[in-house]
Image (spheres, grey):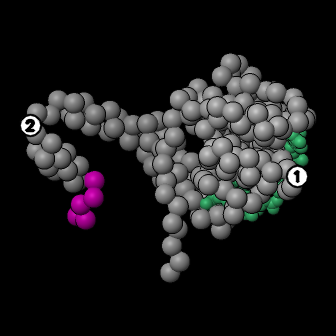
Amino acid sequence: MEQNHLFPVFFKLDQLQVLVVGAGNVGCEKVSAILQNCPAARVTVVATWFAPEMAGITEGYNNVTLVQKEFSCGDLFGKDLVIAATADKELNSCIWEKAKASRVLINVADTPALCDFYLGSVVQKGNLKIAISTNGKSPTIAKRLKEVLNDAIPEQLENVLHHLQAIRDRLKGDFADKVKKLNELTSVLVSKD
Ligand SMILES: C[C@@]1(CC(=O)O)c2cc3[nH]c(cc4nc(cc5[nH]c(cc(n2)[C@H]1CCC(=O)O)[C@@](C)(CC(=O)O)[C@@H]5CCC(=O)O)C(CC(=O)O)=C4CCC(=O)O)c(CCC(=O)O)c3CC(=O)O
Ligand SMILES: NC(=O)C1=CN([C@@H]2O[C@H](COP(=O)(O)OP(=O)(O)OC[C@H]3O[C@@H](n4cnc5c(N)ncnc54)[C@H](O)[C@@H]3O)[C@@H](O)[C@H]2O)C=CC1
């Protein structure tokens, strides 16, 4: 079977600078996804025009800056991640070239080959977060699977996480002891009986 070789990580976007170029449907979706996951994300959106929805999506977020202008190389300065979401293929690959030259990680929304990273479909239940990727095969299936998992995961899991954190903080002994105790305590979750 083919395998998905993407390596998943969870970014702290309140400690990083994100640039989104383009504020049409796709730019709006990406900014919305970022803010739903990390309301304190530091985001700059550069676009020649802004879809009206962008105002609503970013309203009240003083960590988001909207700049109406054409993209220029200087926009990448000080950025950690870039999402190119313009409908102009040539411009997207120009942004890609400049990002690579500056060693800024880039996602070109319409061109998987020019993505250093993909956005995932995200299940969120309190402190739990599950990111789903189909290796770019079908984002729609990722979205559906998110809905299935969202329904399947009980709300009470949040309580379990809080209790486990309290136990984890209280456990004495060395690292190996703690690992053993925590594994014993949670074994019931995966027992076959
Ligand atoms: C490779 C990737 C790169 C990236 O964007 O990061 C990528 C690429 C492309 N998406 C396209 C289309 C659509 N994308 C969505 C939706 C989502 N797309 C997302 C991620 C990713 N999309 C990355 C792979 C993730 C993986 O590994 O599975 C999600 C999960 C996360 C997010 O974007 O936040 C989010 C669901 C969020 C949610 O709700 O849970 C829908 C459905 C919808 O909106 O309902 C459609 C229309 C239906 C269709 O075309 O399938 C096109 C064609 C563009 C065109 O034809 O013009 C390309 C380009 C191509 O494939 O060549
Ligand atoms: N990865 C994904 O999830 C998906 C990707 N796409 C792709 O994403 C791309 C964007 O699609 P839409 O948002 O619908 O396009 P759109 O035409 O609605 O918006 C394009 C945006 O780019 C901006 N822009 C254009 N030239 C610019 C420049 N020189 N400098 C700064 N900003 C500039 C415009 O001002 C506008 O805000 C398309 O190529 C589309 O195929 C489409 C659907 C899903």
Q: Position of residue 15 (x, y in %)?
A: 53, 29
Identify the mark at residue 146; answer none if there is no mark. Answer: none
- The 10 Å Cα crowd at callout 1, few under 14, some 14 to 19, many 20 or more, is few
The label nearer to you, 2 versus 1, is 1
Residue 88 tag number = 1
Identified at 58% across, 26% down, the residue is 40
For the residue with label 2, is its CB less than 8 Å from the closest atom of ligand 1? no
The x, y position of residue 190, in whole percent, is 27, 58
Which residue in the structure is indicated by mark 2?
173
Would residue 57 be found to the left or right of residue 169 on screen?
A: right
Is residue 191 in the magenta section?
yes
Q: Residue at x 69, y 63 (%)?
A: 113
Point out the quarter of the image occupied by ligand 1. bottom right
- Quadrant of the snapshot with the C terminus: bottom left
Q: Are marks 2 and 1 in contact (CB under 8 Å)?
A: no
Residue 181 seen in the figure: no
Residue farthest front in this picture: 101
Of 164 and 94, the residue lying toward us: 94
Ligand 2 within 8 Å, label 1 CB:
yes
Amino acid type, callout 1:
Asp
Does residue 193 sit above or below 107 in this rendering? Answer: below
Question: What type of secondary structure mainly makes up the magenta span?
Answer: loop
Q: Is residue 2 magenta?
A: no
| Residue 30 makes an appearance in the image | yes
Magenta residues (range): 189-193
Q: CA distance from mark 2 to mark 1?
A: 59 Å
